[in-house]
Image: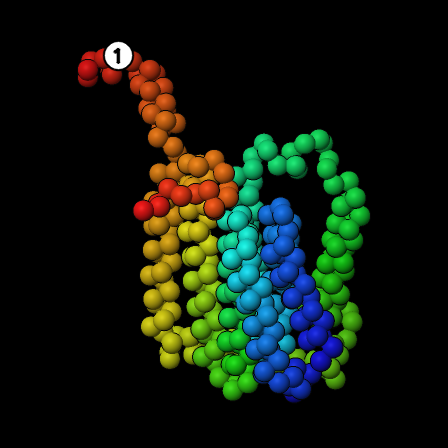
Amino acid sequence: MSAPMEIDVSVYIVLSAVIFFIGLGGVILRRNPLIMVMAIELMFNAANLALIAFARAWTNNAGQIFAFLVITVAAAEVAIGLAIVVVVFRRAKNVDVDEIAGLRG
Amino acid sequence: MTLFWVLAIALIATAVFTVTQRSPVYSVVGLLANFVALATLYLTLNAEFIFVMQILVYAGAILVLFVFVINLLSAGTGPFSEGPNRMPRARVPAVLVGLTGFGFLIYGLARGPLGILPLHVATSQPGEVGRSGVFGSVADFGVALFSTHLLPFEITAFILMVAVIGVVVLAGDAAPAETRGHHVRRRAQEREPIVKAER
């Protein structure tokens, strides 16, 4: 059909994996909870890219539908995650996840 | 082909930018560019509905939520609150971006509804996009979503309800204990006779 037909699905998967591990590195390395949530969003998006690339490769709608569900779950996750960040910030007065140890056993 | 590599490089660059920035505000801008590039990539993969959802939900709702929380957390302490205009040079690119978007809008209107410019039938076939039977069309997506995959769709509604309740519970109880006690005390002082009578 158009130009993207020439690109193999494996290239999309490699791109998806690269974005996923950038996000994973962000979650592990950063200590600002807001940027950690953003890195989680990057990982969600990488998974979505893989789903949609596979949907295109097999011309099957199911991948797109699951990507849609992932977007919904990501929206719910961001809402709850940011609410937790706001609550923790109001209690602890800082946004460094290493110094938040209120739940330490 | 060229579009894919441009988008791929933009995706990786903006992802690295998002993760490595010190200030969350710059991270949000990087994340916005990442989402828009990814949405364009979805469009080249025939995922039209996901393209629209990516722009609406991610670039719209989720990023606005991030910006609100950043404003909430850094109220009065952030660098943007010092001085009258911290970004004077942002005016020129802002006007350029706005005029470019307006130009695209006028161009699209002139080609489509107004009919001033002719449609390029050779490059874009009008009527094919979105028609059922074409892979990735919104019509096929809707039919599959509400027939084959109806149960996951309904479970999504439940997940969203749980999220709404969770956020209300978390944010409604967000005030620290001493602040809450202060509010109660001040309210009690306003209605002093009633409180005294109760005690």
Residue designated by label 1: B193
Establish if A37 lies above or below B78.
Answer: below
Establish if A103 lies above or below B113.
Answer: above
Quarter of the image that includes the N terminus of chain A: bottom right
Residue type at the position of mark 1: Pro
Give residue B163's quadrant in the image.
bottom left
Question: Is residue A99 among what the camera can see?
Answer: yes
Residue A62: image location, x then y, percent = 45, 79
Dot 1: element: helix
Establish if B15 lies above or below B87.
Answer: below
Q: Nearer the viewer, residue A91 or B69?
A: A91
- Subunit under mark 1: B
Give residue B145's quadrant in the image.
bottom left
Residue A26: image location, x then y, percent = 56, 58
Return the residue found at the far front. A105
Residue B107: image location, x then y, percent = 75, 65
Question: Image check: B66 left or right of A76?
Answer: right
Question: Image check: B135 left or right of B149?
Answer: right
Q: Residue at x 64, y 69 (%)?
A: B40
Question: Is residue B134 among what the camera can see?
Answer: no
Instruction: Count the numbered circles shown.
Output: 1
